[in-house]
Amino acid sequence: MELQPIYIQILALAIFAIGLMVAISRRNLFFVLMGIELALNAVNLSFIGFAKTLPADMSVAGQIVPLFAIAVAAAEACVGFAMVIMLFRKKESIDADNYSNMKG
Amino acid sequence: MLLHLLVIAPFIAAVLMVATSKEDPKSSSRLAILFGIAFVVMSVMLIAAGNQATNPIEWFRIPGTKGPVYYYLYSHGLGAWMVFLSCALSLVAIITARNTTCKNFRNFVIGIFSLMGAMNGTFLAADAVLFFFFFEAMVIPAAVLIAGFGGKDRTKAAMTFAIYTLVGSAPMMVALWYLLTISDNSLLLSLAVALQSLPEGTQTAILVSFLLAFLVKTPIFPFHGWQAITYAEAPAPLSAILTGAMSKAGVFGFIAWILPIFPLSMSVVNAMMWLGLVTAVYGALMALRANDGKKLLAFSSMSHLGLAVAGVFSLSEAMLPAVLVLLVAHGISAGAQFFLMGIAERMAGTRELDKLGGLASKNPVFSTLFGAAGIMSLAVPGTAGFIGEFTVLLSLWDMGPFPALVMGFSMILSAAYMLRFIQKVIFGKQAREYEEGTRTSGLEGAAIGVMTILLLVFGFHPAFITNSLHLFDEQAVEQMADVNKAEGEETATETMEMDEDETPIQAMSAEELAQLDSTLAANGFSEEERKSLIAQISGVESQLAASDSVDVIQAAADSAVMLADSAKTNVEALNKEASND
Amino acid sequence: MTNLPLWLIPLFPLIATILLGTIAVTSSPSKKGPAEGIIGALAVMFPAVSFAVVVVLAYSMPEAGIRETLCNWIDIPMFKADIGFLFDGLSRIMLLFVTGIGTLITLYSVGYMHGDRGFARFFAYINLFLFSMIVLVLSDSLLLTFLGWEGVGLCSYLLIGFWNHDINNCKAANKAFIVNRVGDIGFILGMLCLVTIGGAGILNYDALNQFIQMIVSGNHVDIVVPALSVAGVLFFIGCTGKSAQIPLLTWLPDAMAGPTPVSALIHAATMVTSGVYLLARLGSMFVLLPVVLDIITVVGMLTAFWAAMAGLFQNDIKKVLAYSTISQLGYMFMAAGVCAFDASIFHVFTHAFFKAALFLGAGAVIHALAGEQDMRKMGGMIKKTPVTACVMIFAFLAIIGFPGFAGFWSKDLILEKLYVSGPMGPYFYGVGLLTAVITAIYMGRLIILTFFGEYRGSKESEEHIHEAPAAMLLPMGVLAFGAVFSGYLWADSMGITFFSDTLAPVVGSAQAYNALNHIHGHVNPMVFAGLGTLAAVLGMFIAYKIYGKARVPAAKGSSAPQGFKATWTFFFDSVHKYCGIIPVSVLAWICDVVVDKILQAIQWTLGAIATILGDGAASFQVRKVRLQVAFSIAGVAALVIVVLLTGGIV
């Protein structure tokens, strides 16, 4: 049985929802970041899924964009974790609720 | 090429400066001074080269607008001289700052170079969006430098400066965007054409929002709140650049953007002229009472720029050269005064007038320069300031004796506060004991000395400045307008159908050139001037022919014409209006 | 010989300025100044060469004068001006005594300024002054004259405040410059007024004269007179500033704060007479303007009388001379006011000699007394400094118009012209004669207090009294010679009219035009000579009666000029204070304290509103980061739903 594009979208939606829930509900900053990563990957998956619906010669664009997104996500993860480490050094805590300095 | 270099190279220089040592000002200052000299040389070349333009490069499109934004630089006499001011003052700022800011000198230079690039961009941009981009970009390095290197109240000063100027130009941004939605592109001519199609109320609203940005930047009377504290708290070399070059962006905006784009009514012109005059008197009166040396200079600058704005809105024939000479003279003399005040502060440790004094006997070289710069800012005949103020007075006299009288009053006041300033700082006895800081170095003295000599040279031979405007001369403009007339009419009526196959601009035929030549000769141009003028015109045209976008060609050819031409039509309209009354 | 270019004349002082200025600046950090001998030689040589050039040119000048356009100066739409020079009868006379007396006084200064720390700087300023003054009188257009006009004002400022460690000197200098600035603005506006009438070219003197001729010959006088009158009044305001006439006279007494040679050169002989020069130069214009002429005459008359009265009460030797200068300038203005331009220039000429001699003599006295300027502490100086005393007495006889001396010829000429000038003439004449009596009284007082009687200073200072060095005596001698004999260039009663002949090509036609309309009758000049002599003798007699025997009150405090506090300018300092300084201060106070504060308050209010709004918005922000993320996602979702439902906004 051939893989239907809709299944891919459903999977992507599920992963996105999980990522979102993790990002919102966990207090540990690492989990928050990982949740965001997960959501990003879900978007990549969705891209590829849509690309599959197109004829082969036009689907290339849909497959390239996730590559960019992965590169950006890697960079983002780098910076994000570095920031978390710095924050930890400063406050000895990685609980997101402890960081409310930005509140005016 | 020169244009690109002047705008982009400062940013590259700023990046390159990162490679130098942060701790040791000696090594970094050498590189910085070399860069600075290179820029000054380039700006002089730009002035000597006369009018020129780069090929317009499509930059980006703003959503909702019809045409693209071009990266398109264009140099005319006015802009070229302003670029000269920004480059020259930056160089002297680097030289004097070396002795004042030892720590982090490198970062200071980086800021100065970015500021210079932004200023050059402002003065050379031919595209309204590009102009606005640089106009706003100037604020950022300036504010950062104030916050980083300023005096006691530096944070407050930087905030006031940034917020005031950015908020002031915010309405202009909205108005510009609105204009762009109806015009073909963001070049001068299309904007002017687009504006004509709007109802009168909208036109006024757009005019006011444009005016506001320039009024704040200059600054003109009710909008000067940021100026005194900013100039006082900024490091002296930066204050010199701010007043000598950046504040000129306001006046430049009036001349290069307001006058060509907007059909001004008599009431607006009168109001602006009186605002300028009020600023001149108000600044002078404030300077009379100021007790902080840099604040005094700030108000003196305000007074002089008020005169310049009043001159611009006298809209007489002599306005453009008069205001240009005034601006150049003020840029150099006010710049020199700020540099010297910075040195005085460095030596005596204070800038309060009551605590200064007696520097004449302690440091004669400094005091000679200080006195000379002060007197030259008084518009004594034989200095460039006199040529500027006299010709501006002439323009104002054209509007009636009363404006001229007010200007005369402000000139008397300027003598009063400037002499008081000189007396308090360098004459008399030392007001208190203090440990003396670094004295004037030879390089500083020489740099400021050259500035005063320049003022004398321009005072006896203002043709150096006024000749660079000859392309705006009436005859030349009319000639060019004739050549472009056919296309000009078409753009007014059928703006969109332009990219059909008709040739947009006929290159000037040989016989037309000969006719132009003889007209010029009749008007007393010298052999070389004529040759260079014609070479420029044909150069501009061949370049235009090479370019492929019709709209751009149109605007390129016409922006030169428009600048002076629409100012002229304004005057004519005013005359008619006046005679109707 | 004859084709020396005119620009040589101002060139030499300019070179000297640059040279000496460079020396002054470069040598300033060193402990020991540059050699005074070399500096002095340089400083004297250049004006001397300039004087020589003037003499050569003066000798070979054609009747119509020499005109020379050097180069273009300003060239913009609406306005073109050239740098050009005009050497004619009027500028010849002026240049001869400007460069001649200038050279002499420079020589004198070499002795006077000996040992001063700013030796080179002083001579740089003096040469700059000579350059400006030469440009003033040599230029062929009003604009270039204005360059010299402000240039001499600037040099006057620099030299009054030369000893700048004393703040009072600086204040006096500031006052001089600012008061002059008021006049200068009048000058500028006058030029603009002329430009409006006749275009930019009219600023050239020849063009102006042609323009006037055209008007007169075309009978258009009535049309242009109103506009020309405005220009005339504005120019006259310029003249009152530079020549210290009412109401702008207060700066000159204070200007005595400068070194004495400066007072002699700038504030007596040359600069202050440039107002008279301008009136004569524009004579052809002024004759058309009877109203302006009347103003000039009345102002001159009041000034002459007023300053003479003030001179009676001064104790500072230089201030007496300052007031006497103002008074004499009043005479010149009166003469110009009745269109006797040649007589007024003649008085400028003779006055330059005797007043310079008086100042130099006073300088020698001050030098001998080591800086003492108070006449109450002098006395009996004739025994100690006989040469100086002789010079002073000759000059004294000249200024009071003693028969045979220079002032006699010129002053009587002016009085005579006043008498015949019109219906008001006799009254003008009466005041002029009365002023002459007062002049003799206060000058007599000066001579008696300084040179006769007993020495009233301290004993130890008496021993140091010495005659001035030769470098100072020589110029004094030459000037005294001029004070005695310069009057014989125009001795009407002896049939010598050399002076009026030289001026005739310049001011002759103007005066002829005036004579046609106004002057009537002829009177015997011997009567005037007799009356003038009587006035001088009477004044001397009164002075002798009052001051010859009387005990002089002891000096209280210092009489040195004190910035704004000049004594006995009558109420003009107060007028300036209440009409000028205080209103401006009040205005400045209003700007600073009221307007600026209001603007700041508005700014603050706007800022505060923004802050309050920001605080309000911030209160929506929740504390938990996770909640914020949830909210923002909800916001995005809401936006997407809106877009989907409405099909987009655009």
Image (cartoon, grey):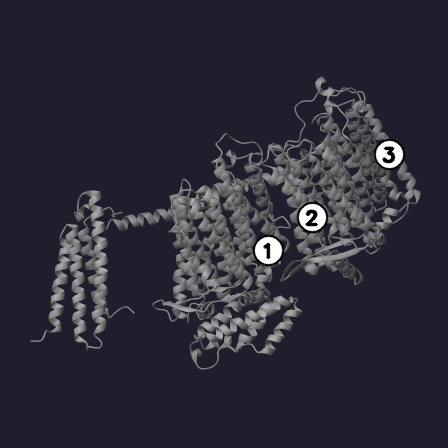
- The residue pinned by badge 2 equals C148
> Percent from the top left, x then y, of residue B490?
48, 77
Q: Which mark is residue C609?
A: none
* Crowding near the residue tagged with mark 1, few <14, some 14–19, many ≥20 C-alpha atoms within 10 Å: many
Check disc 1 and give the amino acid type: Val
**Which chain contains the residue that carries disc 2?**
C
State which quarter of the image contains the C terminus of chain C. Answer: bottom left
Residue C343 appears anywhere in the view: yes
Q: Secondary structure at mark 3?
A: loop
Image height of C115 relative to A34, above or below: above
Of residue C249 and residue C272, the one placed in the foreground of this image is C272
Report in which chain the residue with disc 3 lies. C
The picture places residue B475, in percent across and down from the top left corner, at 61, 69
**Camera sees residue C329:** no
Identify the mark nearer the N-term, 2 or 3: 2
Asked if residue C175 lies left or right of residue C595, the reply is: right
- Quadrant in which residue A77 is drawn: bottom left
Q: Are marks 1 and 3 on the same chain?
A: no
Residue type at mark 3 is: Phe
Q: Disc number at residue C402?
A: 3
- Residue C476: horizontal and vertical position, in percent? 79, 34
Image spot of residue B310 (x, y percent): 55, 55
Mark 2 vs mark 3: give the one in front.
2
The disc label shown at residue B392, or none: 1
